[in-house]
Amino acid sequence: MKDNEVLDKISKGDESALDYLYKKYYRMMTNMVIKNNGTEHEAKDVYQDALVVFWQKAASGNLVLTSKISTFLYSICLNLWRKELERKSRLVHDQKDGAEYSNHEQEEKSKIIHDCINGMGETCRKILSYHYFDGLSMVDIAEKLGYANTDTAKTKKYKCKQKLYQLVKSKYSKSDFLD
């Protein structure tokens, strides 16, 4: 399938284009993360998030592609992985500086997240709980919730994560997490 055909299918909402992209570039994208100190699981997550970003940009009609789709996807993956490495670096640095949270503080923060998730709609509550608390794979979640494929579950998880972020942000201040 040529790049213009993929973009045309995406504009029509045809998820077969997403399946095609996932399979075609999976190894290339995940190898980039793995070669840069990532695990297979992290590589999958980054690639899935990159595909969601690409899909949303392409579906919006605002995407002006000046390179091949593979190059564009690679740059999205690379940027997402760099952000993740920076986040991990800050976390390690904070722990080295003695900023490790006590069990009580960690429980409070966990309670805030649980409360926010429980305040969300049933679909988001199930997806986020299954993924983060039960450790289910996106394949298992898609199957459990009766979705046609894992890409649908991944897209919904991404949107639910965004909603959760906004909900936490609206209900709590940074100081609730940084004390």
Image (spheres, grey):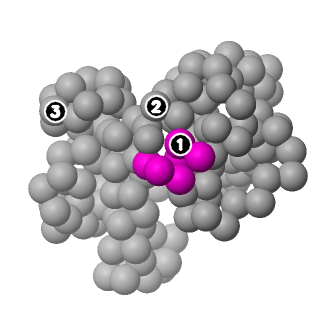
Which mark is nearer the camera, 3 or 1?
1
User: Is 141 on the left or on the right of 34, as rendered?
Assistant: left
Tell me the residue that label 1 is attached to. Answer: 9
Q: Residue at x 46, y 31 (%)?
A: 16
Tell me the residue that label 2 is attached to. Answer: 16
Tell me the residue that label 3 is attached to. Answer: 146
On the image, which quarter does residue 31 sit in?
A: top right
Q: Residue at x 16, y 32 (%)?
A: 146
Q: Which of disc 2 and disc 3 is earlier in sequence?
A: 2
* Nearer to us in this view, 150 or 43: 150
> In this picture, which residue range is highlighted in magenta?
8-13
Could you tell me residue 74's position as x and y percent? 77, 37
Per the picture, the main secondary structure of the magenta-coloured stretch is: helix
Alpha carbon of mark 1 to alpha carbon of mark 2: how far? 8 Å
Q: Residue at x 86, y 52 (%)?
A: 66
Could you tell me residue 25's position as x and y percent? 67, 23
Q: Secondary structure at mark 2?
A: helix
Asked if residue 12 is among those painted magenta in the image, a careful observer would answer yes
Alpha carbon of mark 3 to alpha carbon of mark 1: how far? 24 Å
Q: Secondary structure at mark 1?
A: helix
Q: Is residue 21 above or below residue 113?
A: above
Name the amino acid type tagged 3: Gly
Q: Residue furthest right?
A: 66
Which mark is nearer the camera, 3 or 2?
2
Alpha carbon of mark 3 to alpha carbon of mark 2: how far? 18 Å
Whether pointer 3 and pointer 2 mark residues with C-beta atoms closer than 8 Å, the reply is: no
Report crowding for label 3: few under 14, some 14 to 19, many 20 or more residues within 10 A (C-alpha).
few
